[in-house]
Amino acid sequence: MRRETTELLPLLPTLVAVADTEHITDAAHVLGVPQPTVSRQVARASAILGVDIVERRGRGIVLTNTGRVLIPYLQRALSDIDAGIDAMTEHDARARGRIAVAFQNTLGEDVVPALIRHFRVDHPAVTFDLDQGARARCLDRLADRASDLAFVSLSAEHTDTNSFQLYDERLMLVVPEHHRLASRKTVDLADTADENYIAMGHGYGMRSICDELWADAGFSPRIAFEGQDTHTVRGLVGAGLGIAILPRIRAHGAEGGTVDVGLTQPAARRRIGMVWEPGTDMPRQVAAFRSMVERSGRTLVIR
């Protein structure tokens, strides 16, 4: 390495800032150093190179012809250093870190595990803190910064600025296999106004959706039982204790003595996605996981 290069390296940020601002005082403000320090470093650079890099013009300064030749190389050198640090930090984020994820109970069987499994192929040492529960709990943990990301049913307040939709799914009327509606392909919710319902408890995403569907259908249902997970709700339906509105099952026909019947209401759907707090500075491992979900999540959890 040339002697001039070695001596010039500590002065690169100052020379680039002076070139960008064309003013000693402004460059000092950008660098957060006193103005005389900038002046001395510019003079030092000129002495090292044996030529002037800047010259005064009015109240400001401009690059000399020599400076205009040199500065682009200095800018590229600083840019390469920044890129190297970014690459090193990204590699470090791949090697370690912790991600706190909250998710609704219904997403714990396949959605969240599929996303984590795919992510850990390239990030094997990243660990996850998992918390599952009601939708309201998940969003509260996100707001309190106890979780970095949440996987929940999305609502109107979730937009492109704070969420990413993975998929939406049909909601079905779940009835006992020998129920009067079990042979129907579709049913209007208004036809179920006199039935006993089994519902998720308040605070769960499914309950909020069901409340809206019942209101739109013009009735307030009789809630015979409330559950805290969809398996329990479906089990109570299978026992003949009422009917329910739940996400459709993948298997055809009955499951646990239940039958899924289509609903005619277009709003009988729920959107599932990833939510984050906007305006927060995400740790790199969290940002990497979010990026992976946005890039590949829809293909990993096809419904």
Image (cartoon, rainbow, N blue to C red):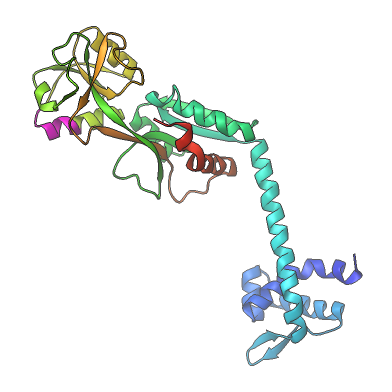
The quadrant holding residue 274 is top left
Q: Residue at (39%, 37%) from the top-left corner? A: 273
In the rendered image, is residue 123 in sight?
A: no
Which residue appears at 74% of the width and 86% of the height?
64
Q: Quadrant of the C terminus?
A: top left
Of residues 87 and 56, which is closer to you in this image? 87
Q: Quadrant of residue 103?
A: top left
In this view, 110 is above or below 34: above
In the rendered view, does 191 fall on the left or right side of 81?
A: left
* Magenta span: 212-219
State the image coordinates of residue 49 (x, y, percent, origin top left). 85, 79
Magenta span contains residue 216: yes
Instruction: Quadrant for the N terminus, please.
Output: bottom right
Residue 133 placement (x, y as % from top left): 38, 25
Question: Residue at the spot x=52%, y=49% of the render?
Answer: 281
* Residue 268 x, y percent position in the rendering: 23, 32
| 279 or 268: nearer the viewer | 268
Q: Is residue 191 left or right of residue 199?
A: left
